[in-house]
Image: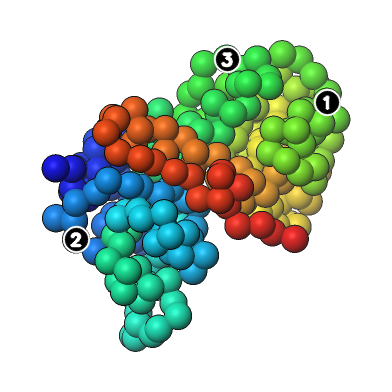
């Protein structure tokens, strides 16, 4: 019989929890490793809707990117995701910064594979900070790349045009604006991320760098479907679903 601990061990194998940042809270955060599993739900965030969806489909485990418990809890009240998980007997495993830095199975790997379907990308190498990747691309303008990224991530990015054509990109899903200078110093003509602050756009303009904000949510959402694929490939005798048919919660 497959248990939560078996799935946890596999996720630990491909995205080691020991590699998470010291401030992070990845791992088995709710439930028991001894719980038997026949159905798994994957998602970006464990919201109340996610918990109720898991309960409705009979999932015993939810695997998310963002931790359902991040800051210390002083109370667990009815009507909160943690309470509802416990009430429903549903376990939660969260793969946060350990997934951000994983080479072949994490958030940035999922974004890389998605971009490869629309852009011819060379082999990826780590960004200097170790989170995210950089790779060669066919030569294109900043506007051409913006149009491609809009189709890939489902929203038109805010961007700076830079001072020349683009032949090499760096990317970090989520919020990676602080790594702009390192990406450009490493030879990237363009840097793709989300949650870019105004001052970082100003820095990019002054550096003559092409910088793209494709959205925190949009650049990390592919991980939910990718994670479902990882689990399904390893454990063929259980049902694995992506929350909301891969759409996640809707921002608008």
Mark number, residue 144 = 1
On screen, residue 74 versus residue 139, left or right, reads left
In x, y percent, where is residue 219?
A: 61, 43
Mark number, residue 32 = 2
Mark number, residue 122 = 3
Residue located 43% across and 48% down the image: 42
Comparing 48 with 23, the one in front is: 48
Q: CA distance from mark 2 to mark 1?
A: 49 Å
* Total residue callouts: 3
Residue located 42% across and 71% down the image: 81
Q: CA distance from mark 1 to mark 3?
A: 18 Å
Residue located 60% across and 21% down the image: 116
Comparing 83 with 213, the one in front is: 83
**First in sequence: mark 2 vs mark 1:** 2
Q: Can you say which quadrant of the picture contains the C terminus?
A: bottom right
Mark 1 element type: helix
């Amino acid at each position: 019989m497959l248990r939560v601990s078996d799935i946890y061990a596999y996720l630990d194998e491909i995205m080691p929890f020991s590699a998470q940042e010291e401030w992070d809270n990845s791992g088995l955060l709710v439930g028991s490793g001894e719980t038997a599993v026949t159905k798994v739900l994957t998602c970006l965030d464990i919201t109340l809707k996610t918990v109720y969806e898991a309960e409705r489909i009979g999932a015993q485990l939810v695997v998310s990117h963002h931790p359902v418990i991040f800051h210390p809890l002083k109370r667990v009240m009815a009507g909160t995701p943690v309470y509802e998980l416990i009430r429903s007997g549903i376990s939660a495993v969260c793969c946060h910064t350990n997934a951000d830095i994983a080479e072949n199975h994490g958030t940035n790997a999922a974004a890389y594979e998605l971009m490869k379907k629309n852009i011819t990308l060379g082999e990826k190498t780590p960004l200097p900070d170790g989170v995210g990747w950089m790779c060669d691309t066919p030569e294109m303008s900043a506007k051409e790349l913006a149009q491609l990224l809009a189709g890939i991530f489902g929203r038109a990015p805010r961007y700076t045009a830079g001072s020349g054509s683009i032949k090499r990109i760096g990317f970090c899903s989520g919020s990676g604006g602080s790594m702009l200078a390192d990406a450009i110093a490493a030879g990237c003509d363009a840097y793709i991320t989300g949650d870019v602050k105004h001052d970082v756009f100003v820095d990019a303009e002054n550096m003559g760098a092409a910088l793209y904000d494709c959205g925190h949510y949009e650049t990390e959402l592919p991980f939910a479907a990718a994670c479902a694929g990882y689990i399904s490939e390893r454990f063929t005798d259980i049902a694995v679903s992506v929350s909301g048919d891969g759409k996640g919660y809707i921002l608008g």
